[in-house]
Amino acid sequence: MIEAKGISKSFRQWDGSVFTALSDVSLRIDDGQLAIIAGENGSGKSLLMKILAGLEKPSSGTVTCTQSIGLVFQDADAQILADTVIEDVKFSLRNRRDLNKGEILGKAREALSAVGLEAKENSPSHMLSGGEKRRLAIASVMALDRRTLIFDEPYSNLDYPGVKSVNAVIEKLKADGFTILILTHELEKCLGLADRFMVLSKGKLVFDGKPEEAVQKDLESWGIRNPRNGSDVQSLVWR
Ligand SMILES: Nc1ncnc2c1ncn2[C@@H]1O[C@H](COP(=O)(O)OP(=O)(O)OP(=O)(O)O)[C@@H](O)[C@H]1O
Ligand SMILES: [Mg+2]
């Protein structure tokens, strides 16, 4: 469970004025839920993610998490740190003093097979396609045994097969009971996966409800394309 109560975050700008990037955001995501937060560029999605994960302190408000959170950042390249695929996943386990070498290798292989990259374990990381890099980033986070995962713009720069391969991993994680939060504005690719849907607009949470209710709203007024186009919400998944 992740619970945020009254989160606000302000920054002092170069001219001395104060910019409020998040304003009184409260939300709760229960264990095993898949929630999506949509919002236009600059609405505060990534900042909220960092605050939920404890990487940034809010100016006010509190965050409570019952599970440790793994983050999959928007820029997969920035999250890939080692030369080969297997070394990259092992790198995320480098601080696990409780595991011996064999156990670290076993865990890394398990994570790679969960994202369908087991055949690429010795490939140079920089040679992977965009979708494979994103799946490698997911594997490195999964190896950490985090049961709550936040995906920041998981579809950016991905073509149709890339989006499908990331969604296949997300659907498997959901079936395995992971708690998942996806930050995106590309609803046509994923809204059908969501149990919950929220909208951030200019740092405020302006909608929190079911995806089916959301598509009845004027999402465009919050800068988000309404993907419905007569189709049912469940079918809004690229798979
Ligand atoms: N450390 C910081 N100092 C000053 N302003 C910041 C800082 N971090 C974020 N902001 C501002 O807060 C706002 C929200 O940023 P954030 O990165 O959360 O947006 P976002 O919704 O993730 O946008 P995008 O869709 O472009 O990724 C932006 O206006 C940004 O400039
Ligand atoms: Mg962002």
Image (tube, rainbow, N blue to C red):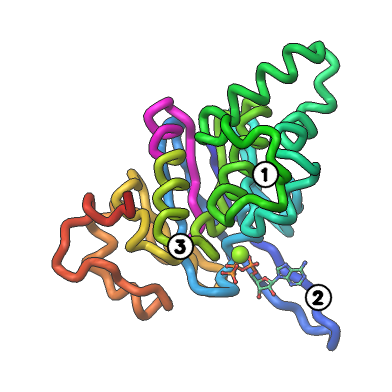
The residue under label 2 is which amino acid type? Arg
Q: How far apart are the two marked residues, 3 and 2, measured between alpha carbons?
A: 38 Å
The residue positioned 66% from the left and 59% from the top of the image is 75
Residue under the point 45% across and 62% down: 159
The correct choice, above or below, for 223 with respect to 125 in the image is: below
Which of 61/237 is in front? 237
Residue beneath label 2, please?
A: 12
In front here: 61 or 55?
A: 55
Label 1: how many Cα within 10 Å (few below 14, some 14–19, many 20+): many
Q: Secondary structure at mark 3?
A: loop
- Name the front one of labels 3 and 2: 3
Residue that carries the numbered disc 1 in the rendered image: 53
Q: Is residue 104 magenta?
A: no
Residue 183 colored magenta? yes
What secondary structure is marked by label 2?
A: strand
Question: 192 or 106: nearer the eye?
Answer: 106
Of callouts 1 and 3, the N-terminal one: 1
Q: Badge 3 local density, few (<14 within 10 Å), some, or many (20+)? A: few
Give the residue type at disc 1: Ala
Left or right of 233 in this view: 101: right
Residue found 36% across the figure and 48% down from its top:
196
Q: Which residue is mark 3?
A: 159
The picture places residue 216, in percent across and down from the top left corner, at 21, 67
Element under disc 1 = loop
Q: Amino acid at mark 3?
A: Asp
Is 154 drawn above or below residue 20 in the view shown? Answer: above
Query: In the rendered image, which quarter is residue 118 located in?
Result: top right
Q: State the extent of the magenta-drawn residues as a range.
A: 171-184
- Separation of disc 2 and disc 1 at Cα? 22 Å
Residue 50 seen in the current view: no
